[in-house]
Image (spheres, grey):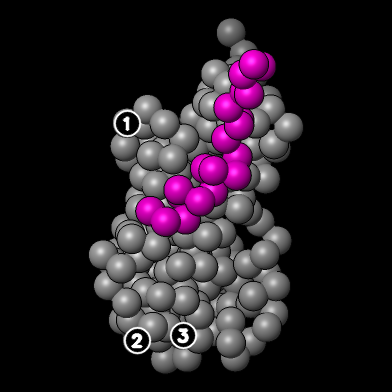
């Protein structure tokens, strides 16, 4: 029976795609470690390729520039936090928002040296900042949980959940930049700020109690 050449081409394409994805992940992880260790300016693609155990030409093939690689590493860190479900669902919107913020803070703090690098790069090169604004993390699990609270009547029905999630996620990132990195505040301080934020936000998004007619 004759072999189907089309199936062979499809299989080959899938193999190449998996290989590229695997190599890209190794490059991103190596770049994260290298940028965090020596900073953006001192880091070279040769150092990153050596750390990844791959040919340097692959970096130039998969990424348009060192700046683009830095942006992609940032997205990979943020996306990793957006896709995982690190804590069980809370019983109230306020507790859910607070847990989400603290989880984000914990994730950012684990890569604090890298986020210091990306912040300094944004300050020196506005194009990096603009590039970072082009994509937004989805935070699907968080959106699903807030949507469930909305369906149960805990959150106002006129609110857009995606916009609300984006607001809260930006608050987590802003707190990391402003307090953890720039002001060198403690994690405990940031957590207290998040608690106050979640309480005040919940008051604004909650359905007000019905007035009883006398």
For residue 185, say whether it is visible: yes
> Does the magenta portion include 70?
no
* Position of residue 69 measured from the top left corner of the image (x, y, whole percent): 54, 70
Q: Quadrant of residue 213?
A: top right
Direction from residue 148 to residue 50 in the image, left or right: left
| Picture layout, residue 72 above or below residue 3 | below
Q: First in sequence: mark 2 or mark 1?
A: 2
* Position of residue 16 measured from the top left corner of the image (x, y, whole percent): 54, 44
Mark 1 crowdedness (10 Å alpha carbons): few <14, some 14-19, many ≥20? few
Q: Which residue is mark 2?
A: 38
Direction from residue 14 to residue 114 in the image, left or right: left
Q: Quadrant of residue 190?
A: bottom left
Q: First in sequence: mark 1 or mark 3?
A: 3
Q: Residue furthest front?
A: 214
Q: Which residue is mark 1?
A: 88
> Does the magenta portion include 197?
yes
Q: Which residue is mark 3?
A: 40
At x 64% / y 37%, what residue is drawn? 161
Picture quarter with the C terminus: top right
* Position of residue 43 measured from the top left corner of the image (x, y, whole percent): 42, 85
């Amino acid at each position: 029976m004759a072999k189907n050449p089309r199936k062979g081409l499809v299989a080959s394409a899938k193999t190449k795609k998996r290989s590229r994805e695997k190599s890209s992940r190794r490059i991103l992880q190596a770049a994260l470690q290298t940028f965090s260790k020596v900073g953006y300016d001192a880091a070279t693609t040769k150092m990153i390729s050596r750390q990844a155990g791959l040919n340097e030409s692959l970096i130039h093939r998969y990424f348009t520039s060192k700046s683009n690689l830095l942006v992609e590493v940032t997205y990979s860190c943020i996306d990793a936090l957006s896709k995982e479900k690190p804590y069980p669902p809370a019983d109230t919107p306020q507790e859910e928002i607070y847990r989400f913020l603290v989880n984000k803070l914990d994730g950012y703090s684990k890569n604090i040296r890298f986020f210091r690098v990306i912040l300094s790069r944004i300050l020196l090169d506005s194009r990096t900042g603009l590039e970072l604004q082009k994509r937004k993390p989805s935070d699907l699990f968080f959106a699903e949980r807030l949507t469930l609270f909305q369906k149960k009547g805990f959150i106002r029905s006129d609110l857009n959940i995606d916009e609300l999630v984006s607001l809260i996620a930006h608050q987590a990132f802003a707190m990391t930049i402003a307090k953890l990195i720039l002001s060198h505040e403690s994690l405990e301080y940031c957590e207290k700020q998040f608690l106050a934020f979640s309480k005040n936000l919940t008051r604004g998004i909650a359905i007000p109690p019905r007035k009883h007619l006398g």
